[in-house]
Image: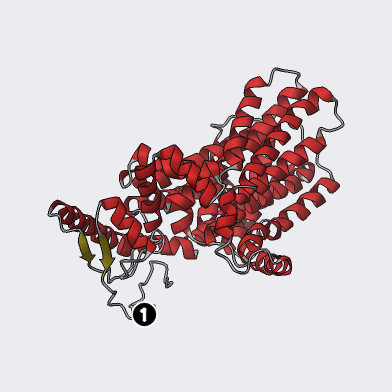
Amino acid sequence: MRKHAYSIFTFYMNAIKKDLHILRLSPPFLLAIVSTIVLFSFIWLGQYAHPSADDFCMAGGVNHDGLFPHLWNHYFEWSGRYSGNAFYAMYPLLFGMFEGLKFMPGLLILGLLIASAYFLSQLFRVSIAAKPVLLVSICFVSIYLLGMKHTASSLFWPAGALSYQTANILFLFTAGLMIQLLERQKQQKSYSVVLFLLLLTIVLGMGTNETNLLALSGILSAAFLINLHSGWFYVKPWLLLLLLSLLCFAIVYFAPGNAVREATFPLRHDLSRALKGSLDMGLWVLTGWLISPLFIVASLLTPYAVTRLANLSSRTFIVSKRLILLMIIITLAIPFALQFPAWWAMGGWPPPRTVDAIYFVFIVSWFFMLGLVSIFFLPQINSFTNRQQSSLYINLSLSLAAICFVLAVLGSFRFQRVYTDLTLRAEPFHEYMLKRYELIYKSVEDNNLALRVPAFNEEYPRSIYFNDIVPDYRDWRNVCYADFFGLQYIKREAQQIESYHKVKRLRTPFNGYN
């Protein structure tokens, strides 16, 4: 009997060991598939996106004044974001007001993927096409997209997307180029091309938005201080980069348009209010990020990813407890420090797209910090994984973590909303907007320049809908809309939906409600 029981136990253990070969491939496969689904879902949503009222204001200004005169006036009358405003103003000229919006989210997501892969390849000194690099990049971008507070203004609204997502892309490229510059200096190789590219990314990145302005200023200042006592050969390029960043900072900060814009906020420049608001909201968003199931699972998976990348790397990593402690302090300070400019300038909560920009910088720093911790314990991890029994537990735990990641993605509020918008809300909104454009073009053709268009009496796809005209033709949104299409005025009928709570709420495929 005992011998029979032992043979059954041996049979099951051999079966488990045989299946482990599949499990080793299964967790990366699961992560790659679900992350790819997330990315394609957001790209697909872009096919139903339409310009908001703000987009017609910028496009109308460019049409009237010309590109450079309009940007010059914008700098003096509204905002110092010289490159962010330029990306926004050039977008309809290069891609078309309506056609370009279908490709913009996809191009930005692709840019985030490439920038993430480039940064990882430089950090670990591995090929940018290595499978672990691509897998981590895809997962990272999907985590960022699902952690956004407001995808409509952060990804599908050109003013927000072209100011903030380009900033995120440039931030990662700048960090990767900084690593490459350090590498070439240590090897005493020519770094003129790398330095030129760094100068370019800094000039463009510093002018995108205030969040990226502070983030880039911080890492460039840190890099300069690190190399300060290394001799003139090492410090020379970093001094040049720091001086350029200070110049760009001054161009943005002292823009006359900032004062004009800030004048519209009565609670601006209240130091005590700005400090309290930054602390309160910083704590609120930090707590929300840290308790997110997807964020927790992704953090648990980070040591596996870092261990895999580190074992592929030819780089020798030296991580101290002091460095880890410093990164913990910096990472936890990011949600508070990057809140301050908005509170100081406006006296109130920053817009959701700014919070999404802060979230991006935070998760870059967070996963970098977890990477340092993983590398610090790498010898112990490698020793543990080399044992056959321990390797079994690690593979099982990795499989479990991958399954939890899939469930966290599918069960997240953002993914459920995207799914609901794709399957139920986006197409009716898209058809409604196409009919509106037909009415506008026909009205202009018939020389009927005073137009009233029907309201959209269904629920908006909130993943992509941001801003629209209103029933009052004198509203600034309506004025910009009418000016772009050549109308005298345009207004929208009042909606028949009495309130959000009286609209039938739509069930998602995962037994949740949006």
Q: In the rendered view, tell whether residue 1 sits above or below residue 159.
A: below
Q: Quadrant of residue 318?
A: top right
Q: Residues within 10 Å of mark 1 (few under 14, many from 20)?
A: few
Q: Residue furthest left?
A: 446
> Mark 1 is on which residue type?
Ser
Give the residue pinned by disc 1.
Answer: 499
322 on left or right of 358 = right
Which secondary structure, mark 1?
A: loop
Nearer the observer, 148 or 136: 148
318 on left or right of 28 = right
Q: Could you say where residue 231 lies in the image, as x and y percent from the top left? A: 85, 25
Tell me what residue is drawn at x 75 percent, y 40 percent: 221
117 on left or right of 423 = right
Tell me what residue is drawn at x 44 percent, y 58 percent: 152
Q: Could you say where residue 100 lies in the image, as x and y percent from the top left? A: 35, 43
Q: Residue furthest right?
A: 229
Q: Quadrant of residue 451?
A: bottom left
Q: Could you say where residue 37 lies in the image, as x and y percent from the top left? A: 43, 51
Look at the image and tell me in which quarter the N terminus lies.
bottom right
232 on left or right of 346 = right
Nearer the observer, 210 or 368: 210
Nearer the observer, 491 or 109: 491
Tell me what residue is drawn at x 67 percent, y 48 percent: 214
Q: Quadrant of residue 269?
A: bottom right
Tell me if I can see residue 26 in this picture: no
